[in-house]
Image (cartoon, rainbow, N blue to C red):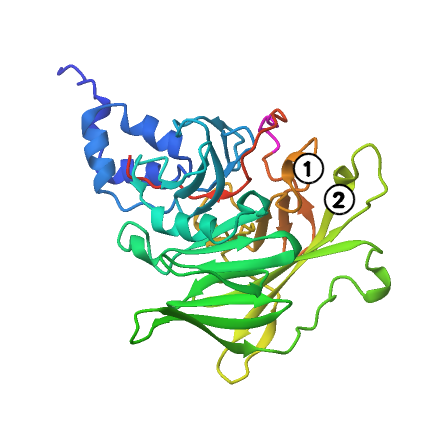
Amino acid sequence: MKEARSSSWSDLLPEILGLVLRRLPSLADRVRLRAVCRPWRSNAQLDALLPLLPWLTLLDGTFLSIPDGKIIRLPIPFKAFCRGSVDNWMFFVHGDGGCSLMNPFSKATRDISKLVTTWFNSNSRCYSYHFFKLVAPSPLESSPGSLVALILEGGGRIRICQPPIAPRLSLLDDITFFHGKLYGVSRDVLSTFEITYGLDSKPKISSDLCITSYPAFFRLWPPRQVPGSCLVLSYLVECCGRLLMVKRMIGCNLETEPCPLESDRTAGFEVFEADLSTKPGQWISVRELGSQALFVGKHCSKSFPAGEFTGVEENCIYFMRDYFPANLAANPLGDSGVYNMKSGNIKPLLSETAAVPQHHGGRWCPTWIFPTDAM
C-alpha cells in the first residue's frame, strides 16, 4: 500500500488561491497570504483582484481599516500632516510650509512645487484654509499634471487652481471630475469649469451653469421636523457612470456643554442624480444605490462595488465627522457611521467585533484613502 503523500501549501491550485484572495478585502490579510510561500506570491500577483476596502486617516497619523477596525501605522514624511487625499495619494503639509503628494503604499512621491507656489504665494493667510481637496480626471500615476486643487477659506470661499494657474475665487461646496470635465456644486447649483490657454499663454478659467433648479429636499425631514439648528453638507461623487450629489443633514446643538460638538449627529442623507440630457439639467431623486456603497467626505468621496465584498454593505453611505475642525471634538469618530438608503437607519462605522480606537488627538484631517494591491 502506497503511503499517502503529504501535500504542501505551495501545491494549492491557483484557482483556489484566487477564490481565497477575492474574499480578503483587507490589504494586510492579502499581504500575509502572499507571504506564506513564493508560489503563492507569484500566483496571487497574476490574479485580477477586486479593489481593496478604504482606510480612514485618524488625527494622530494612523490609519483605520474598515470595517474590522484595525489600526495601521505606515512610514510617512517627518513632521508632515495629512490635509487631503485623492484615491491612494495623500496630500501632506510639512512643518517648514512645504507640500507634497505621497502614495503611502508604494512610497512614490509627486512634485507639486508649482501648485504649492500658487496656493501659498497668492494669499499670505495660508494657514486659515479649512481644508484641501484634490481631484484628478485620471490616475495620477499616468497623468500627474492633471491635478486640480480645491481650497476652502474662511467664509466659504473656494480657490480652484491647477499648476501653474492662479486661483479663481468662487463659492462652492464640492468639486469632482465626471467624464473628463470638472464639476462644482454651490447651494445645489451645478457648474462646469474649463481651464484654457489664450494666445498670450495665460490661463483662463471659464464656467458654465448646468443645473440651476433646486432639488425637492427634505423628503426625509418635513420642514416642521427639521432641527432648529442644522447643517447641510453636499458631496459630489461619480457612481456607475452617474454624477451624484449627496446631501447630509446634521442636527446641531451649540448650547451643549462642555463640548457642543459632541451632541452633533447626522440625521440622514438624500441622494440626487444630475440629469444633463437637457439644458439646463435637473436633479433627480435617487432612492437606491443598488450593489454600490458610497464613501463620502469633504476631502475624498468615491463609490465602491460593495455587493462583491463581505464586510461592506451595499445600498449604503459610509461617512465620517468631517465638519468643523475634527480635533475640537473629544471623539472625532463620534458622528460617523453607515446610512442605509432603504431603511433610513444609521449603524456604527466599525463592525460589532472591532475594537473602538483610542481617541488620540493630532493635526491630521480625517479622509478616506483607497489602498492599492501592488505590494
Q: Tell me the element at label 2.
A: loop
The residue tagged 1 is 334
Q: Are marks 2 and 1 in contact (CB under 8 Å)?
A: yes
How packed is label 2: few (under 14 Cα within 10 Å), some, or many (20 or more)?
A: some
Real-space Cα distance between discs 2 and 1?
9 Å
Q: Residue at x 56, y 59 (%)?
A: 158
Nearer the observer, 323 or 156: 156
For residue 274, the mark is none
How many labels were placed on the picture? Answer: 2
Nearer the observer, 121 or 360: 121
Q: Is residue 36 left or right of residue 281?
A: left
Type of amino acid under label 1: Gly
Does residue 132 appear in the picture of this structure?
yes
Q: Position of residue 93 (x, y in %)?
A: 46, 38
Q: Residue at x 59, y 74 (%)?
A: 283
Residue 253, compared with residue 191, is above or below; it is: above
Residue 122, compared with residue 32, is above or below; it is: below
Q: Residue at x 51, y 36 (%)?
A: 57
Q: Which residues are magenta?
A: 352-357
Q: Tell me the element at label 1.
A: loop
Type of amino acid under label 2: Asp
The residue tagged 2 is 264
Nearer the observer, 16 or 319: 319
Principal secondary structure, stretch drawn in magenta: loop
* Dot placed on the residue nearer the N-terminal end, 2 or 1: 2
Q: Residue at x 31, y 44 (%)?
A: 111
